[in-house]
Image (spheres, grey):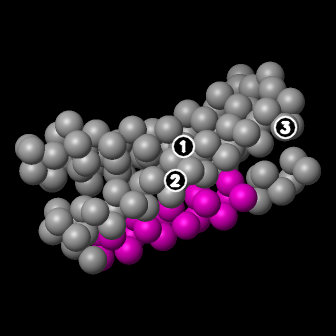
Amino acid sequence: MAFKFEKLKVWQKALDLADEIDKMTKFFPKEEVYVLTSQAKRAADSISMNIAEGSTGQSNPEFKKFLGYALRSDIEVVNCLHLALRRGYITEEIFRKHYQACEEVLIMISALIKSLN
């Protein structure tokens, strides 16, 4: 692996989460394609993208800034999960599974931020 971010477990976990959100949204109604489906997928993808972008060739303060963006994207995914549950697009079981994955990513990003201080 040539890039620093590829070795980060949090980046790998964020990729897994993005894949799971992508799979989940395939079952959303067609009227949500340009709304909740798009938003959930973009937010989930943004987590790993910000980790990658901030990690390579950046100072620690700059990397922390990008990790903050990744953290906010993770929280955005959680909000999308709540909306999907309320609208009846996902079950409580699916909600809990992805919510837990978001919590794990949040904890990992927070720990990485602390390690850069």
Residue visible at 86% across and 30% down?
Answer: 59
Give the residue at mark 3: 61
Q: Amino acid at mark 3?
A: Pro
**Classed neighbour count for the residue bearing mark 3: other residues with Cα under 10 Å, few (<14), some (14–19), many (≥20):** few
**Classed neighbour count for the residue bearing mark 1: other residues with Cα under 10 Å, few (<14), some (14–19), many (≥20):** many
Indicate the secondary structure of the residue bearing disc 2. helix
| Res. 74 mark | 2
Q: On the image, which quarter does residue 50 sit in?
A: top right
Give how far apart the Cα atoms at labels 3 and 1 are: 18 Å
Q: Is residue 24 left or right of residue 12?
A: left
Q: Decide which of tag 3 and tag 1 comes sooner along the chain.
A: 1
Q: Position of residue 79 (x, y in %)?
A: 39, 60
Q: Residue furthest bottom?
A: 92
Asked if labels 1 and 3 touch by Cβ distance under 8 angstroms, the answer is: no
**Classed neighbour count for the residue bearing mark 2: other residues with Cα under 10 Å, few (<14), some (14–19), many (≥20):** many
Give how far apart the Cα atoms at labels 3 and 2 are: 20 Å
Q: Amino acid at mark 1?
A: Ile
Q: Is residue 5 left or right of residue 62?
A: left
Asked if labels 2 and 1 touch by Cβ distance under 8 angstroms, the answer is: yes
Foreground: disc 3 or disc 1: 3
Indicate the secondary structure of the residue bearing disc 1. helix
Q: Is residue 52 above or below residue 67?
A: above
Q: Decide which of tag 3 and tag 2 comes sooner along the chain.
A: 3
Is residue 3 located in the magenta-colored stretch of the structure?
no
Q: Is residue 49 above or below residue 35?
A: above
| Res. 47 mark | 1
Of residue 70 and residue 23, the one placed in the foreground of this image is: 70
Q: Amino acid at mark 2?
A: Asp
Is residue 110 visible in this depiction of the protein? Answer: yes
Q: On the image, which quarter does residue 70 sit in?
A: top right
